[in-house]
Image (cartoon, coloured by chain):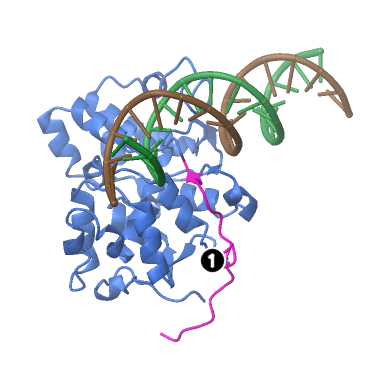
Chain colours: A blue, B green, C brown
Amino acid sequence: MEELELPSRLFETGFEPVGRKRVNSYFNLRWIDLIKLALDKDDLEMLQGTQFATVLRMGGHTFSVMFAHYFLSRQLVTEKELELWWMFAGKPLRYAIEDFALVTGLNCEEPSASSMHGKEKVVVRVKGNARGKGTTSNSSIWEDLFGFGDAVAFSIAGSCWGILCPMCGSTKIRPEVVNKLANLDEFLIYPWGRESFLLTVKSAKPRSPLQYVQDTIAIQGFVHAMVLVTLTACPAILVKAEDGASIADDNRRSEEILESLVSRKLAVNVPWAKTVDQKGQVRLLFRSSSRIKIYFAE
DNA sequence: CGTACTCTGCAATGCCTGGT
DNA sequence: ACCAGGCATTGCAGAGTACG
């Protein structure tokens, strides 16, 4: 592929925000283990056979709020409405829906026209503010809305809650989507990945440089997927951690690297990640994958 | 042990919406 | 149009934890 001139960056090189900047400082992945604890063995096995299987293995991951801010502040300004690009280790990394699908395993297909009609939106809100100061917990909202008594349905709803709007009570969810909860089979195959990805990109894309300069910034959706895309593209970030060397093995395909990432206890060492970025140790990781590639933006 | 980082709670601010 | 209330977002600070 011909190398073209890169688009301009959100911040000029060397002028990115520094310090303790954070993205989604209230986002964590503990809900995954909580859901697993709430399920009995059979129900858990059933759920592990669905699109949620990969996400359910991420309970040992720590979402690095500072690392997320680090690479998002190195964004490239592109006209791609549904893609985010950022520079890492001297290379442009793309975050598109196929990348999201690869790292999360969630269904990202376009919903059929018959299943998704109308553009009306409903706001599912937590009473009180987004940090749980209100009088109604997330769980009771789902119970109030959908009458869940079943642990499986509740866990799946919880998964979607975590994927779509982790720690955020303001995510707009279409009524058609909410109605999916009435039918478990439909719910399990619904493209939740697409919902989450669109939320993420549409909330991150319009953010101004000024907002990235602030100490904290809130982005909806499953932002941890961005971290996984970056780590998969540049496993050298984890070379300091346990098992990092095996992950950074040049001969491994992206699917194999992802398998290692998902199944392990994962926490990004931000100072080391910055070192890797500055040394330019990224590799064209997806060369052996037919689904995902790193290429220069048009 | 010190430092850096994550996580959490509380408060302030500003936006949105509904009522008048 | 104006006002008031509710709520999301952000800022700040401190406790807990991991790591060198």
Chain letter, disc 1 residue = A
Front one among C12 and A183: C12
- In percent of width and height, residue A218 lies at 52, 42
Q: Residue at x 46, y 84 (%)?
A: A3
Q: Residue at x 41, y 48 (%)?
A: A223
- In percent of width and height, residue A217 lies at 54, 43
Whether residue B6 sits left or right of residue A171 in the image: it is: left
Whether residue B8 sits left or right of residue A123 in the image: it is: left
| The N terminus of chain A, quarter of image | bottom left
- Identify the image quadrant of residue A48: top left
Q: Which residues are magenta?
A: A1-24
Helix, strand or loop for the magenta stretch, by majority? loop
Is residue A30 one of those drawn in magenta?
A: no
| Position above or below: A3 against A218 | below
- Identify the image quadrant of residue A29: top left
Q: Residue at x 18, y 56 (%)?
A: A260
Q: Which residue is mark 1?
A: A76
- Identify the image quadrant of residue A254: bottom left
Three-letter amino acid code at disc 1? Leu
- In percent of width and height, residue A275 lies at 38, 63
| Position above or below: A11 against B19 | below
